[in-house]
Every structure is written in structure tokens, then in C-alpha cells.
Image (cartoon, rainbow, N blue to C red):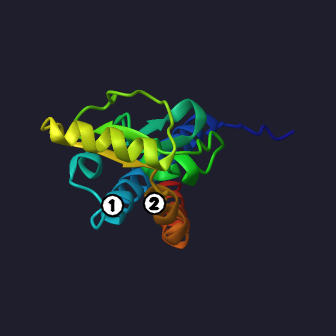
Amino acid sequence: MAVINFKSNRHAVDAKVDAAIKNALELLGQAAEGDVATNLKNNDTGALRGSITKKVVEEEDSVYIGSPMEYAPYVEYGTGIFAEKGGRQSGWWVYVKGNSSGIHGHKSYTYEEAKRIVARMQAQGIDAHMSQGMRPTHFMRDALVKNKGKYEKLASMALSSGVK
């Protein structure tokens, strides 16, 4: 009778697969982070572009790309009558440049009312403006969709070279 010895390499294989996935997520995150920041070059002062970061969550086999800047979602999805994800506020509102909360909050006005309020404030030396909102730029979505093929190739290369 022959004796067959079996040695499982499962733990070593699992470790290589986990390392390859982590490496792939890091590479994808770096690439996407750069692509999103590059996509902002023409319509950003630099603060938002410089805040684009990645976060790898190994437990989920995921990488998240985003910005901690409070206004980033408004740039991506738009505001006011241009807002993409609901909350389309009609009318005009008044804001003071450099004051994120605005003097008049979220109250909307008719065009004529807003025009009068802005004129009064500007006469007092306040840098006031009126708006119906901001169009979405899709800086993140456009960058990620445009580069989908590149991410697929990066993931494939990282996974195939990491698991040998």
C-alpha cells in the first residue's frame, strides 16, 4: 500500500491573492486619484483638485476616491435649478462671496427681488451676487468613466503578476 502525503498551500495562496488584491486596489486608487485631479485642472482654483484622495478598504476589496471638501458634491452634481440629484431649488438666491453660509441663507427670491438686494448690498461695499445655481461638472464621474479601460488593464496586470 502506498502512502500519499498531502501538503496544503492554501494559506500561502490566500496570502498571495490578498496581497495582489491590495496592490491592485492601491494602483487603481493612485491612477483614479490622478485622473480625477487632472480632470479638475480647467475648472478649479486648486483647493478641490489638491484635496482628491483615495481610501483603500481591504475588508470590502474596494477603493474610494473623493474629497473631504464640503463643496465637492455641489461641484460634481450642481446646485439650484441645475442640481442633478433632486433638491432643484427654483428662483434666485443671494450670496456673499467668501461667506459659505451666505447672508440670506437658502431663501429664494424672484429675479427682481434678488437684483434689488444685491444692488443694496453692493452699494454698502459687500461683494454680493445672485444665482440660480451652478451646473454640474461631473469631474469625478467623467474621469472614472473615461479611464475605465485603463483601470481594467491595471487591475488585470496587478492581479496576474501578483498571484504566481
Q: Residue at x 66, y 42 (%)?
A: 86
* Left or right of 141 on screen, residue 100: left
Mark 2 residue element: loop
Residue highlighted by disc 2: 137
Q: What is the x, y in percent for residue 77?
A: 53, 50
Q: Quadrant of the N terminus?
A: top right
Tell me where residue 4 sits by quadrant: top right
Determine whether 20 is above or below 154 in the image. above
Q: Amino acid at mark 2?
A: Thr
Q: What is the x, y in percent for residue 94?
A: 37, 39
Q: Amino acid at mark 1?
A: Leu
* Left or right of 112 on screen, residue 160: right
Mark 1 residue element: loop
Residue nearest the viewer, comparing 33 with 61? 33
Q: Are marks 1 and 2 in contact (CB under 8 Å)?
A: yes
Q: What is the x, y in percent for residue 72?
A: 40, 43
